[in-house]
Image (cartoon, rainbow, N blue to C red):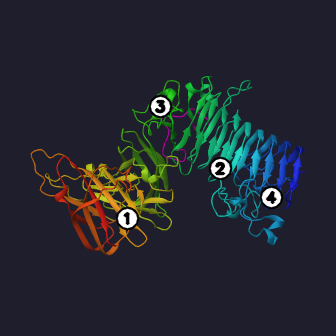
């Protein structure tokens, strides 16, 4: 037989106290993706055998002659590690209940959630199911279920083969987007999987979804206990490496896998990771995005040596190679210690970052505590990804500020993580100008839990050698449609670049030196486009350039702390901007004049009058500005009337307000 219990187009059924064994394919099976309201209570499935594989062919290749294959649901050409075609519980619609079920001894997966975006099978032609989308349907109840002795304990991802031949490439309509449940108003709903236990598996949980929560889970004796894709949360959970009485302590065990991310881990207890090279709390798997940072809080350790051997392994569980290539699919990622409980016993504190022991991404200031195979840093890290335009490919050589370098082989895409501390990295192109002359784009993104990107001030500076006569970097914007651009500012010196509040660049001979600030989402890219750059002459020796110490604007009654300033006067909205400068002392010299330089960034204005006032007080910061403490408009210093063009600079005479060694506030508004 190739199915144990099949629920086909059936609703509100209770399946209780059923025992299945020696099934080829799937045990408890939901057929068409429309079945809802059913309850699976206290069932057991064991001895579930894989299909589409054979001893003669092996697991790495499909055996399409297996007579147990059901063509409509058994896809045998996919990743054999995560998608081997058998399961104890095959789920095609999440709007059901699973309580107290057990999967034991399964060749493939214990609980496999594969959620189509439409009705399939016989139900596809039934009009009552025309609007069914299981991939957006909220989860019913999933609690107190257990999987052990299987390849994967819980899998939520692709796997059906609806139309293509057995063993062929998976079609797009079978691939499945990451699970994104929504309520009736289209708002996201977080699915919660509670009290799940997985032990003696290769992968305890593989969960590919945009969000989700595993609460009060327990894991033990798994090659990797949790393999989570994006922004899911793991809360109040137990990770055991080698359990007491484990028969084979040489078997490699790891806790949380570091994938695309960033994930959230809160209230985690680690135990049994005390066997040196065979036990690692974290496993660096690599991923397409390498988003930083995994966000960890309220961590605790068993008093068994686990805390003294904190480590991050390579993809296959080996001890991390400090000199390994850091600029590829297996690029490392960073773990943010929210409250110091993850790294405090090794010298870390709240805000420390835990990293693999890799020379390229760390420097001498990053500490490796005795007994650890990981390092602690005080720096935040950014996801850095460069992709050449067109069909171009090329090598990339990246030199870190401390001189460590990594040269990547020729490819169309290169990725790693870099420190966000304004030290200078250097990139060169060993393949020559043919790789970059059509342009390229860069993703630079820092994620820090739910922190708004606009409040993350950390940045990185990269010198691109020899490209200033070939490409320009004028903006970052949505890579798909070019919308919502943020324009870069050209500056005349490295000092100005370092002090710039937003994205900026400096032309230094034939080098293009760029300051990167975080974009708001992975859809945004810095655009390097064909063109030449004209250097700005540095200011004369008696000119001093000063950047604002605080900048914010108030929209109606709401304060916006942003790298951009906005001004507007309309019937439904007013925006007033505030700038504060700390004017340096000028010994033996008098200030003979002062100019406020503003550049139009993303919203042109016609027939407008822009006014600059001296503020009535300096008792505010960009963090505490409100309508209550906002400085008044004391004295009108200058104004300009006309059409304001994107990218053009405008200069306002503020000489009357500037005094050496004192702070000064400017209030900026408009009549349009």
Discs 3/1, front? 1
> What percent of the width, then of the height, locates residue 490?
29, 59
Q: Nearer the viewer, residue 439 or 449?
A: 449
Give yes or no for residue 327 being in the magenta stretch.
Answer: yes
Mark pair 1, 4: CA separation: 50 Å
- Element at label 4: loop
Q: Which mark is residue 348?
A: 3
> What percent of the width, then of the height, locates residue 584?
20, 47
Q: Which mark is residue 212?
A: 2
Picture quarter containing residue 115? bottom right
- Sequence-earlier tag: 2 or 3: 2
Horizontal side of residue 204 vs 454, given as left or right: right
Q: Residues within 10 Å of mark 2 (few under 14, many from 20)?
A: many
* Residue at the farthest front position: 628
Mark pair 3, 1: CA separation: 42 Å
- Element at label 2: loop
- Which stretch appears magenta? 313-330
- Sequence-earlier tag: 4 or 2: 4
Residue designated by label 4: 36
Discs 1/4, front? 1
Mark pair 2, 3: CA separation: 29 Å
Label pair 2/3, CB-CB below 8 angstroms: no
- Sequence-earlier tag: 3 or 1: 3
Picture quarter containing residue 569? bottom left
């Amino acid at each position: 037989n190739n199915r144990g219990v099949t629920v086909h187009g059936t609703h509100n059924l209770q399946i209780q106290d059923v025992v299945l064994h020696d099934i080829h394919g799937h045990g408890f099976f939901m057929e068409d993706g429309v079945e809802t309201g059913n309850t699976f209570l206290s069932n057991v499935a064991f001895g579930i055998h894989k299909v589409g594989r054979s001893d003669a062919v092996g697991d790495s290749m499909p055996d399409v002659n297996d007579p147990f294959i059901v063509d409509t649901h058994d896809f045998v050409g996919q990743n054999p590690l995560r998608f081997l075609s058998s399961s104890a519980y095959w789920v095609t619609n999440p709007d059901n209940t699973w309580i107290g079920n057990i999967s034991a001894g399964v060749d493939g997966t214990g609980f496999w959630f594969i959620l189509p975006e439409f009705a399939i099978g016989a139900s596809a032609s039934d009009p009552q199911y025309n609007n069914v989308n299981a991939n957006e349907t909220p989860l019913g109840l999933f609690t107190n279920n257990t999987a052990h002795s299987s390849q994967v304990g819980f899998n939520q991802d692709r796997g059906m083969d609806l139309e293509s031949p057995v063993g062929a490439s998976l079609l797009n309509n079978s691939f499945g987007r990451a699970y994104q449940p929504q309520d009736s108003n289209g708002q996201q709903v977080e699915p919660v999987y509670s009290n799940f236990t997985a032990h003696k598996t290769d992968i305890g949980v593989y969960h590919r979804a945009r969000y989700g929560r595993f609460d009060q889970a327990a894991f033990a004796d798994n090659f990797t206990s949790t393999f989570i894709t994006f922004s899911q949360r793991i809360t109040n959970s137990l990770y055991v490496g080698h359990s007491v009485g484990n028969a084979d302590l040489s078997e490699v065990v790891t806790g949380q896998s570091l994938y695309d991310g960033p994930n959230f881990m809160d209230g985690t207890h680690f135990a049994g990771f005390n066997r040196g090279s065979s036990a690692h709390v974290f496993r660096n798997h690599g991923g397409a995005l390498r988003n930083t940072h995994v966000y960890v809080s309220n961590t605790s350790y068993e008093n068994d040596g686990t805390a003294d051997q904190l480590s991050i392994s390579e993809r296959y569980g080996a001890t991390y190679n400090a000199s390994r290539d850091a600029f590829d699919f297996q690029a490392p990622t960073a773990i943010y210690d929210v409250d110091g409980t993850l790294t405090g016993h090794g010298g870390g504190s709240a805000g420390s970052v835990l990293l693999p022991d890799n020379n390229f991404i760390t420097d001498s200031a990053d500490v490796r505590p005795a007994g650890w195979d990981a390092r602690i840093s005080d720096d935040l890290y950014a996801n850095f990804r460069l992709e050449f335009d067109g069909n171009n490919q090329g090598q990339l050589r990246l030199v870190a500020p401390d001189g460590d370098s990594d040269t990547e082989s020729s490819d169309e895409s290169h990725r790693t993580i870099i420190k966000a501390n304004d030290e200078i990295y250097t990139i060169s192109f060993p393949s020559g100008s043919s790789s970059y002359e059509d342009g390229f784009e860069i993703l630079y993104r820092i994620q820090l839990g739910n922190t708004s990107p606009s409040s993350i001030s950390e940045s990185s500076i990269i010198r691109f050698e020899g490209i200033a006569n070939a490409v320009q970097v004028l903006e970052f914007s949505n890579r798909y449609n070019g919308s919502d651009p943020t324009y870069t500012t050209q500056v005349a010196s490295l000092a100005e670049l370092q002090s710039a509040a937003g994205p900026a660049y400096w032309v230094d001979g034939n080098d293009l030196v760029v300051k990167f600030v975080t974009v708001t989402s992975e859809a945004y890219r810095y655009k390097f486009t064909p063109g030449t750059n004209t250097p700005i002459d540095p200011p004369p020796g008696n000119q001093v350039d000063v950047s604002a110490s605080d900048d914010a604007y108030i929209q109606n009654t709401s304060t916006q702390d942003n790298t951009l300033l906005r001004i507007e006067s309309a019937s439904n909205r007013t925006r007033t901007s505030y700038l504060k400068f700390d004017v340096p002392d000028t010994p033996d010299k008098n200030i003979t004049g002062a100019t406020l330089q503003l550049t139009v960034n993303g919203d042109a204005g016609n027939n407008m009058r822009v006014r600059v006032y001296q503020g009535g007080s300096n008792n505010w910061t960009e963090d505490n500005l409100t309508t209550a403490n906002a400085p008044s408009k004391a004295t009108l210093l200058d104004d300009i009337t006309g059409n304001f063009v994107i990218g053009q600079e405008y200069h306002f005479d503020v000489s009357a307000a500037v005094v050496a060694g004192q702070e000064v506030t400017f209030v900026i508004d408009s009549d349009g």
